[in-house]
Amino acid sequence: MKYVNSLCTQVSQELQISTETEDPIFTDTVIIGNGPSGIALSFLLAGNWPFYNGEEHPDQLLNARLKTCSKHIPLLLQDLEFLSQSMEGRCRNKISNLIDALTHPNAELEINHPSLLEYQYLADKFVDHIVIGKGTPGGLWQNIDKDIRTLSFSNWMSLPGLPFEIWENKVEVQIRRVEAGLVAQYYEDYVKLMKLSKYFRNNSQVVRIEPKSGEDGQVRWEVFGYDNEQNKSFTYKCHRVVLATGTSDIPNIVNVPGEFSFMGRVFHCLTGFEKAIEDLVNRNSEVVNDVRSVDPVLIVGSGFSAFDAAVCARKYKIPITHLVRKDAIPAVERQLNRVYYPEYFELKELENTQPAMYKQYVEYTLTEIQMMRGKLIIIMKSPDEVVTSHTVSLVAILTGSRADLSYLPVSYQNGKVLAIDTSKGIDSKHNSIQINPMTHQVMKAPEGLYALGPLVGDNFVRCTLGGAITATSHIAKSRE
Ligand SMILES: Cc1cc2nc3c(=O)[nH]c(=O)nc-3n(C[C@H](O)[C@H](O)[C@H](O)COP(=O)(O)OP(=O)(O)OC[C@H]3O[C@@H](n4cnc5c(N)ncnc54)[C@H](O)[C@@H]3O)c2cc1C
């Protein structure tokens, strides 16, 4: 069985799988995925519940609804449906927008308004649970290139009860973006500092889950997986399973000849690409300042990861050929403020250098990758079907990623049958898992299956907390 199949390095590693199996473990809730969603849910299930502190909210309509909200009753026992009425914002789900508005009031005006939520430990609210994740706590943040800076400001990367800047020991909150490596460290430390480590089974992968009907007519779930640290299989039997596995495990491919033929030269993730650039620079250290002597890198993709790859190549002064589906720079300009995101704007300016350090090919498609006399050649087609070939040093195909839900029962067809539109695969932007927004239970599955984060269209860390609070509220009510 393959447990590691990394498109980043094009290497499929067969791990030594032991046949050792531990006895089934009984717990209430199994959370699959140890990223921000899974960590926030663990904090809440451990008994740390939010209370509204009674302060004024700058949104007057929300403020009026908050007048019905008691300071002394935990927020998740209050009428979240009413409180989240007509809430809009960055998140897909209304309750996520409510929780985001309470945690980061006035966020869009870039004001660091203090949170209106306070967390209290309530021992009787503890729910026994385990969080299972492939790597160390932090989810995709453990795999993102450490030097790439977040799109979000640092305080928006915070998890409940320990704001990022408090963890950093910053006296004054600044509006700034931070390196992904620092965010990954914060999530790892958060689990330790909030005393959650005992609920985490890291470096472990869930390979299968199954619903089982009990004699009492209630559904139980069985979760099977493999612990790569202890080299043994495990089984959990539980009442509930929470899918918090994100949508970044399988990089998209462009499906052209040669895409998988040149190991170490063609990449589908930023980390492998940046490492290869460093090696390229080291090999060419004496000529690298002369841009004419190094073949350009080809970057395919119009999203932020593709632009991050270009920013990375620019850092090393390597010329860049960038294939984008539409002129993506105006999209960047529309979405981002130049003061905080200068690197994306500086790229475009490189088109005017002599020779041009950055060249964008809008609506061109990559049709083949070849190797000729040790040189990597890419063939591309213009919108009017003119075919050209170019020599490049490396290729980065960064056209997005999708969820790996292969651990679901086979009949769920990789999650497709759980989607809003069951004729298409799961996609965080357009076709997420369909949930009841008031409970976060998956609509098209037996009872006890929940989903959070990008899997349900809540794509920013700011948005993941609302789902975790909603699920905790429903779990607490169903246990009573
Ligand atoms: C390049 C990039 C940049 C981003 N920048 C920002 C940003 O600046 N700000 C922001 O708010 N959001 C950003 N995001 C969005 C990001 O999705 C969220 O920040 C957040 O990581 C979602 O948290 P999550 O816990 O739901 O999922 P993830 O962080 O994806 O964590 C899920 C974890 O579950 C693991 N997993 C998957 N399958 C299994 C299995 N079978 N068994 C065990 N574990 C499994 C995954 O490997 C992963 O580690 C960015 C996303 C990307 C891809």
Image (cartoon, grey):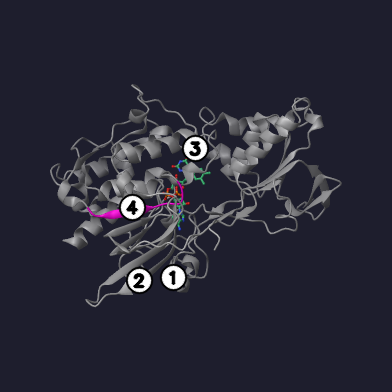
Residue at the far top in the pictured view = 171
- Identify the image quadrant of residue 242: bottom left
Q: Is residue 215 above or below residue 349?
A: below
- Asked if the residues shown at circle 3 and circle 4 are in contact, with their CB atoms under 8 angstroms apart, the answer is no
Q: CA distance from mark 3 to mark 1?
A: 35 Å
- Label located before the other in sequence (3 or 2): 3
Q: Which callout, 4 or 2, points to the residue nearer the camera?
A: 2
- Name the residue at 67% across, 33% down: 278
Local packing at callout 4 (Cα closer than 10 Å; few below 14, some 14-19, many 20+) is: many
- Identify the image quadrant of residue 348: top right
List x then y, in percent, for residue 182. Answer: 45, 33
Q: Does label 3 point to a residue whose CB lies under 8 Å from ligand 1?
A: yes
List x then y, in percent, for residue 45. Answer: 26, 51
Element under disc 1: loop
Q: Which residue is mark 1?
A: 409
- Label located before the other in sequence (2 or 1): 2
Q: Which residue is mark 2?
A: 211
Local packing at callout 2 (Cα closer than 10 Å; few below 14, some 14-19, many 20+) is: many
Q: Which residue is mark 3?
A: 151
List x then y, in percent, for residue 254. Answer: 67, 56
Q: Amino acid type of disc 1?
A: Pro
Residues in magenta? 127-135
- Label located before the other in sequence (3 or 4): 3
- Label located before the other in sequence (3 or 1): 3
- Answer with left or right where residue 376 lies relative to residue 331: right
- Asked if the residues shown at circle 4 and circle 2 are in contact, with their CB atoms under 8 angstroms apart, the answer is no
- Answer with left or right where residue 49 lies relative to residue 460: left
Q: Which residue is mark 4?
A: 467
- Identify the image quadrant of residue 20: bottom left
- Label located before the other in sequence (4 or 2): 2
- Asked if the residues shown at circle 2 and circle 1 are in contact, with their CB atoms under 8 angstroms apart, the answer is yes
Which of the two residues, 78 or 455, is positioned nearer the viewer here?
Answer: 455
